[in-house]
Image (cartoon, rainbow, N blue to C red):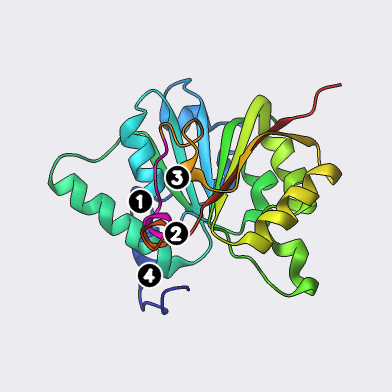
Amino acid sequence: MRLRNIPGAEEAILKSKYAIKDPETKKGKWSEVFKNGNPIYIEVGMGKGRFIIDNAKAYPDRNFIGIEMYSSVLLRAIQKMDKMEEEEKVPENLYFICMDAKDIENVFGEKEIAGIYLNFSDPWPKDRHAKRRLTSRQFLIRFEKVLNDDGKIEFKTDNHDLFMFSLDEIEFSPFMLKEKTFDLHKDSEMVKGNIMTEYEEKFSSKGNPIYKYILSKKHE
């Protein structure tokens, strides 16, 4: 469920130093934005930012970009960063972009990204909306263009139907399945190092299984 529209959210994002304005101008130049050559990881549909912020704190030798299309949701992540700045705990390896994921090839260059996280993406349950699902073959083709040769996609959801759809779509994509689990928190191997999202904590606390897969590029 998305947050209600928050008046002034777009203006606040434009003013924030943590949000990248005109991201298309940074295509192929993201290392210059971070001022280092560390690998870049993105979360598509980052919500209120817990996952990407925790990753940035846990892996200071990586760069992170959180993508969210809803300004009222992204605002919550910016507010978290502002609070951490007041406490002098803000990670310096993280930026946000307010954008639609379908434009990803306009924002990132070929093979510029080391990894993509998809967490609890909108299931778009109606069949006619299947192409809008972030794990559809249409999106996987887009993601393949910006991922480097060793790049991975990690996908988590509590939605069984979406997970089964996502597994089926791999066959029609430039990716191959590396790992999967139908109950992440009971999988002793795949749960190692797991960083939770807000939704994941909520759903798993109720005993709901969390589904996850990891994809890598197919190589000729």
Which element type, helix, strand or loop, lies under badge 4? helix
Task: Provide the residue designation for mark 3.
Answer: 185
Nearer to me, 168 or 23? 168
Task: Provide the residue designation for mark 1.
Answer: 50
Nearer to me, 126 or 13? 126
Residue 191: x and y in percent read 45, 37
Task: Provide the residue designation for mark 4.
Answer: 9
- Specify the amino acid type for callout 1: Arg
Residue shown at 33%/62% (left/top)? 76
Q: Earlier in the sequence, mark 4 or mark 1?
A: 4
Which element type, helix, strand or loop, lies under badge 1? helix
Q: Circles 2 and 3: CB distance less than 8 Å?
A: no
- Specify the amino acid type for callout 2: Gly
Q: Earlier in the sequence, mark 2 or mark 3?
A: 2
Q: Earlier in the sequence, mark 2 or mark 4?
A: 4
- Specify the amino acid type for callout 3: His
Spatial distance from mark 2 to mark 1, Cα to Cα?
8 Å
Location of residue 161 (image quadrant): bottom right
In which quadrant of the rendered image does the C terminus lie? top right
Magenta residue check for 195:
yes
Magenta residue check for 211:
no
Residue 109 shows up from this direction: no
Horizontally, residue 138 falls left or right of residue 187, namely right
Q: Nearer the viewer, mark 3 or mark 1?
A: 3
Residue 47 marker: 2
Magenta stretch bounds: 194-201
The local crowd at label 2, few if under 14, some if 14 to 19, many if 20 or more residues have their Cα within 10 Å, is many
Q: Circles 2 and 1: CB distance less than 8 Å?
A: yes
Residue shown at 56%/31% (left/top)? 29
Spatial distance from mark 4 to mark 1, Cα to Cα?
18 Å
Q: Earlier in the sequence, mark 3 or mark 4?
A: 4
Residue 63: x and y in percent read 44, 31
